[in-house]
Amino acid sequence: MSVNHYENFPVASLLLPARLRPAVKVIYAFARSADDIADEGDASPEQRLAQLAEYERELDNIEKNSSSESQLFKALAKVIREYKLPLQSFRDLLSAFKQDVVTTRYTDFTGLLDYCARSANPVGTLMLHLYEQASTENLRDSDAICSALQLINFWQDVAIDWQKQRIYIPLDDLSRFGIGEQQIASGMQNEDWRNMMRFQVARTRNMMESGSGLAKRLPGRLGWELRLVVQGGLRILEKIEAANYNVFQHRPTLTKTDWIRLAWRATHM
């Protein structure tokens, strides 16, 4: 899942084995700080891209076994070497963050999935490598889950993203359902909007369910963590449906009551 998803799945971090928590903390610090460079504050696009380019140079230094003055990248280099993590996953994350700086619209679903493959899927890939479970089948299902989580985040945050002048709903889907950007700006609810959101929710649910077998294959805590993550994502989709797809006035989030429901569902997957 992308770094933005942790607000919805706080229980997952509690299930991490103690031995892996320091490594995960370092990976999260890298991703969170890079994401903030791309998305927070008042820096210009040129300044943001320059700072992200510096992160890329630090990754190059890790690959060359060169030393760094940064405490973050010293710690990251240690984690990458200790767990033999793929550097490409970190580069993919930076690529997605750079794209956030310059891209505010997506023409079609293929382009959006390409973004998800770099903004979300690397996190799942890194976790599988940490747990030494990075088989071809596991990576495939992890990609489906992580991309679905990223899409769920987009659907619940339509209004928030609009305030940042971003639209993640593919433009060809908006056109096909007769929806213009002004409708998003005004938060107008009508049958066209509900039909479009119903389509996105169904497509995303299918994607999540297609990868859910991974949660049952993975052993121990990782399997239980992923069960909760999958069920949490599916629950957000249910809440979007329950709000009749009005994500402008009812942004769905998970409550304590939801977590009781998710725990029960996780044991019955």
Image (cartoon, grey):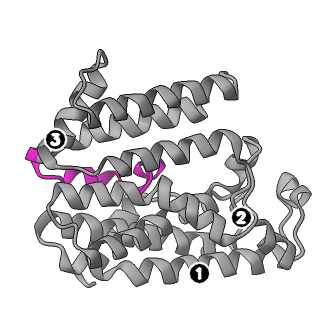
Task: Examine the rendering and report whether any part of residue 41 can be seen.
Answer: no
Q: Tell me, for residue 151, which label it has, or none.
A: none
Q: CA distance from mark 1 to mark 2?
A: 13 Å
Corner quadrant of residue 267: bottom left
Of residues 13 and 124, the one drawn nearer to the viewer in this rendering: 124
The quadrant of the rendering that contains the N terminus is: bottom left
Q: Is residue 207 left or right of residue 135?
A: right
Which residue appears at 87% of the width and 54% of the height?
Answer: 186
Tell whether label 2 touches label 1 (CB within 8 Å): no
Q: Tell me, for residue 203, which label it has, or none.
A: 1
Pointer 3 or 2: first along the chain: 3
Which residue appears at 35% of the width and 35% of the height?
Answer: 59
Q: Amino acid at mark 1?
A: Arg
Pointer 1 or 2: first along the chain: 2
The residue that label 2 is drawn on is 169
Which residue appears at 20% of the width and 70% of the height?
Answer: 223
Q: Magenta span covers which residues?
A: 1-19
Q: CA distance from mark 1 to mark 3?
A: 38 Å
Tell whether label 2 touches label 3 (CB within 8 Å): no
Q: Is residue 188 magenta?
A: no
Which residue appears at 54% of the width and 42% of the height?
Answer: 97
Corner quadrant of residue 184: bottom right
Q: Amino acid at mark 3?
A: Arg
The residue that label 3 is drawn on is 81
Of residues 200 and 247, the one drawn nearer to the viewer in this rendering: 200
Q: Is residue 102 left or right of residue 154?
A: right
The quadrant of the rendering that contains the C terminus is: bottom left
Q: Amino acid at mark 2?
A: Ile
